[in-house]
Amino acid sequence: MKICRLSLFNLKRNKREAAAIVFLTLVSSFLMATFAVSITQINSAFDRALEEAGCADFVLLFQADKYRDIYRDILEEECNVTDVRESSVLCGAGASALSKKGESIAYNMIFADENTERKMENFQKLNALPDDEIEKLSHPVWLPQYFEITAGYAPGETFTLVSGGRDYPFTIAGFYNTGLYNSSSMLKCIISDDDMVLLSAVYEEYRMIAFDTEREFSYEEYYEKCSAKTNENVLSAVIPLDKDMERMVETSYLAIFLYMSVFLSIVTMISALFLILHKISKDMEEQMVQIGVLEALGYTSRELSLSYICEYILTGGIGAVTGGITAAAFSPVMDTLTRDMMNRDVHTDVNILRILIVVISIIALVTCFALSRAARVKKIPPVVAFRKGIKTHHFGKNILPLEKMRHSINVRLAFKGIFNDFRSNIGTGICMIAAGVAIMFSVYLFDFFKSGYNGLIGVLGMETPDISIIMMSGVNGENFCDEIREFPEVEKVLLTRAMGNYVEIKGCNQSATVFSYADFSLTDNIRLKEGRFPEYDNEIMISVRREETENRHIGDSIIIKGDVGEKSYIITGIVTAMNNNGMSVYMTEDGYRRIRPNDRPNIVEITLKNEEDRPAFTDKLTALYGASAKDTAYEQTSQTEQSAQSVQTVQGSLGERIRAEADEKMAVLISQYGVTDIDYAIRIGDTVISGNSSRFVIKEISSMKDFLKSQMESIAAVTKTFSFCAVIFIAVVVAVILGIIAVSAVKRQRRELGIMKSMGYTSRELMIQLTLRILPVTIISSCIAAVLSVWVQRAFWMAAFGVQIPESPPLIIGTAAALVLFCLTVTYISAGSIRKISVTELMTE
Amino acid sequence: MISVLRTEKLCKSFSNGATQQHVIKNLDLEIMEGDFTVIMGASGSGKSTLLYALSGMDKPTLGKVFFGDTEISDYTNDQLAVFRRKNCGFVFQSIYLLENQSVLDNVLTGAFTVQKNSTELIRRVKELLAKVGIDEEMQKKYPNQLSGGEAQRVGIVRAVINEPKILFADEPTGSLNSASGRDVLDIFTGVHENGQSIVIVTHDIKTALRGTRVIYLRDGKVVGEHRMAKYGGATKERREKLTAFLDEMGW
C-alpha cells in the first residue's frame, strides 16, 4: 500500500511525463496489436473469399490461335492436376474504359458469359439490381468487386468500354465475387452472349484452363513439356494466374503497410523505454535526499525500487491496455481499409488472445526496463543519498575547462553540459536514430510519390509512350517510324515488340520478359543501376531483382533458350525494373533476333511533345493510315448486328461495295484469328475484283499510360498519405521525447540555472545552452539515421517491388538537416520553462 | 556623494492564495557610491526582499528603482539579467556555487558574461582567488571539496570579478563558523576600501560593524538609519554606538 502511495505521489508530481509514457505505450500497443490481429486475418479473409467464389487454384489463359489440345492433355496426364475446366473468354490487355469522371483508364480485362463463369466459379452475386430490372437491360455487365470498391461504381450505372475511338456502353447489373481476376493486374467481367459476340471483334479470344492440384505445380516443367511436344513457344502464348499470385497482388501492399506499422510501433516503444529509463534516473537523482530519508525511516531499497516500477507498470499498463482496446475497436476501420486494399468485402475477427499477448508483452518489457534502472536504489545507502549521491562529487578530470575557452561562453558551457549528461545523451541518441530512420524513410516515400505515380513509372524499367501502335505484319517498321518522326507533334519514336515475349534462361527458376530496342540510350525509363546498355548482339542487361535473387552480375554469361537453340549473352548492365515482378531482361534488336530470327518488331512507341495532343494525333494517324484492323472489324460486327434491325443504306458502285466488304472480312480475320497476310480475288461475270491486306497498316492503337494510371494511381495516393501521416506521427513522438527531456533538465537543474540567472545570464542564453547540449547528439544521430534510412529504403524497395530507386543526396542531407533543426527548435521551445525560474524564489528557499 | 541606487515609493507584495502580503511599503531609499550599506531588521521585515528589488533580481510590485538615472523597474527579465551582469555582484548565504564546475570555472562562468577570455583575465582571477586564500591546487577542485568558508570566498571573488558598480550580499556569513565569517568579512572590508559600493543584509552585529551606514527595516519601511566612519577595527565606541542604535530600533 505504501509502495502504491509513493508511486502515486511520483505520478502526481510528473503528470506530463506520465501522460507521455501513456501516449507512447498506447500508440505502440495499438500499432503492434493491429498488426498482430490483421497480418494473419488478411490471408484468411482472402482464402475465405476464394473459397466462397469456388475458384480453381490455377488458371492458364492461352491465346486461342496458339492453343493446342495437347496442352490440356499434358496437364491431365503428366502434371497430376485435378478438376480441369476449360472454356473460351475474351481478353483485352490494356483495354480502355471510361472512369466515372469520363477519363480514359486502361485495364487488363477478361470477358466471359454467365455460363462460362458458372462453369469456372460459383458466380456469387453480391450487390445487384432487382432481377426484373436486369432482364430489361440490353447490355448488362457483372463487374468484379474491384470496380465497386476502387472505382466507385454502383449497380445501374453505365460502364463504358472504349476501343478505336468508339464507346461500348454497358449497364452494371451488379457486382460479383470472383476468386481470381479481381485486382488491377487482371479483371474479369461477365457479359451476355450477344455482347460476347460483339466484343469478339474488339478483344482477342483466349482459352481458359482452370485446374486444382494436390501437389506443387511447376510452370517451368509444364511449359517445357508443352514446348517439347509441340515445338512451339508456349511462353509467348500463355498468361498464368494462381492463388498465390493473386494473393500477392491483393495482400502484399496491405502487408507492407502493416509491417511499416510494426516499424513505427518499435520506434515508439524504443522512445517510451528510453523515456522510462531517463525518467527513473532523473527522478532518483532529484529525489536522492528523499530516498535517503525514506531509507533512514526504514523503507527497504526493494520497496523504493518497487515504487518506481509500480509507477511504470501503472502508466505503461494504462497505455498498453488502452492501445489494445483501441486496436480491437479499430477492427471495423481495419476491415474497411482491408476491403479498400484487397477490393473485397472482408470481415476480420478480433483475435483477443493476440491483443492480450501484445499488451502483456509491452507491460513485461516496460517492467523489465524499469526494474533494471530502479534496482540502482540498492546502490544508494542513506549516507550517500544525503550527500546527493556520489555523482555530484566531481573528483574526476575537468572536461573543457573554461580558461582554455576560445569561443562563446554559452557554447562552452553547453558543451561542458554534454559530458555531465553523457549516458542520457546516448539514450537520446538511440531514440533519435530510431525516430530519424522512420522519419527519413517516410520522407523518401513521400517524395517518391509526391507527383502521383510518375515516380513508379520511372522505376518500371519499361517505356511509357503516349501512344503504342501495333503494326500489321509485313509493314516495314523502320520506314513507318521514319514517317511518324516527320510529324511536328512527335518528340520521339521507338521500335520494339509487344511485351509478353517470355524466354527461358538456363539455370534460372523464373522465365523472363524480353525488352528489345535498337538503341537503349533513346529510352527514358530503362535506367541503369550500374554498367552500360547492351550494344552488341551478344550483350544483355538484367534487372536488379534477378541480380539479387539469381546472383548474376555484370560480366557473367547467361544462356537463353531460343527458337533456334541456346544462345549465350554477356551481362553488361543492371536495370532498375519493377515490371513483371522485376524479372525482365534487355537486349538489342540484333540480340533478340539471335533467339527468334523470324520475330520482327511490331510495336511503335510514340512520345508526343504535348501529351494533351494524343486524341487529335490518334485521329490524324487514322486519317492517314486508315482505321486499324481492330476498329474495322468492330464496324463489321456491329453492322451485322444492326442489319437485322434496320435497313442499311449502301452507297457507291458494286466494285466499291465489294471492296469495302472484303476489307471488313480481312479485318476480322486479322484481328480475331491472327491472320497476317490475305489476298483475295472475286469474279463477277467478266470482272475480277482483287485486293490484299496491305491496305491495313495499323492493327491496334493503345496507350500504356492509361493502363499504368489504373494500376498505380491508387497505390501512389495511399502511400503518399501514409508516409505523410507517418512523418507527422514520428515528429510528434520526437517532440514529446525531446520536450520532456528539456523540461526535466530544467526542473533538475533549476538550482544551477537560477544561480546563473543571478549571475546575469538571460533566460534566452540559458535556453540556447540547453539547446546546444543536444546539438552533437542530434547531428550524429541524424547522420547515422540518414545512412540507415538509405539502407532501410533499399531493403524496402527490393523486398516490395524488386527495384532500387536512386537516392537523392540533397533530399537525404536536407531531411537530416531539417531533423536537426526540428529537434533544436523543439528543445529550445521546451526549454522555455527556464523563464519561469524565479531567482528570488530560489534564493529565499 | 553620488547616488548609485534610488527607490521611489517602492512596494513589493506577495500573494498567498487570496491574501496579499505587503512586504515593502512605499519605500524611498538612496544608496550612495562608495557606501558600505548594511540592512538590518527582524525576520520578515523585508530585508532580503528589498535587496532583491534593489539589485534587479526581482521586480517591484509598485514604485520605481533607479540605477543612476536609469529606471530599471520596468525592465524585462532578460534586460534585468544583462543589467545585473554589468553592474551587480552577489554573495549569498547559501553560497550557490555551480557544483558541476571547478572553482576556477565557477568564477570564469561569471567573468565571461562581461569580459572576453584573455590571459590577463585568467591571471587576475587566479590572483584574486589566491588573495582570498584559494591556491592553485584548490582552484582545480569542485565546490563539494571545499569548506563553507572557502566556498564563500570563491563566491565573493565570483561576485567582484566583473568590477560591479555595486556588490550585494545576503547574510554572507550566515552559514559560516566564526573564524570563516571573520575571514569573509575581512575580504568585504578590503573590497570596500578599494572604493566598492556594498549593500549587505544581515542580522549579525559583527557584520554590521563593518558598514558605514546601517538601515533598519520594520514592516517593510525604513525606521532608522545609523552612520559610521569607515571600518578601522571593531572598536568599543563603534560597537556601543551601533548597539545603542539597534536597541533603540528594538532589535
Image (tube, helix red, strand yellow):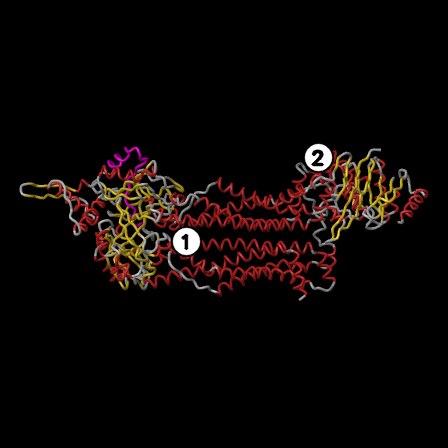
For the residues bearing labels 1 and 2, Cβ distance under 8 angstroms: no
Q: What element carries label 2?
A: loop
Residue A271, percent from left and from top: 56, 53
**Residue A169 appears in the rendering:** yes
Membership of A497 in magenta stretch: yes
Q: Mark 1 points at which residue?
A: A253
Classify residue B8 by image quadrant.
top right
Q: Which of marks 1 and 2 is in front?
A: 1
Q: Name the residue under label 2.
A: B116
- Disc 1 residue crowd, few under 14, some 14–19, many 20+, Cα 10 Å: some
Q: In this view, does A758 lie above or below A20?
A: above
Q: Quadrant of the N terminus of chain A?
A: bottom right
The front one of A519 and B110 is B110
Residue A356, percent from left and from top: 51, 64
Q: Is mark 1 on a helix, strand or loop?
A: helix
Mark 1 vs mark 2, CA separation in Å: 62 Å
- Disc 2 residue crowd, few under 14, some 14–19, many 20+, Cα 10 Å: some
The front one of A566 and A25 is A25
User: Is residue B70 shown left or right of residue A776?
Assistant: right
User: Is residue A758 shown left or right of residue A333?
Assistant: right
Membership of A296 in magenta stretch: no
Extent of the magenta region: A478-505
The mark found on residue A444 in the picture is none
**Residue B158 appears in the rendering:** no
Q: In this view, does A698 lie above or below A54?
A: above
Residue B105, percent from left and from top: 72, 42
Q: Is residue B217 above or below residue A486?
A: below
Q: Are marks 1 and 2 on the same chain?
A: no
User: Is residue A67 shown left or right of residue B71?
Assistant: left
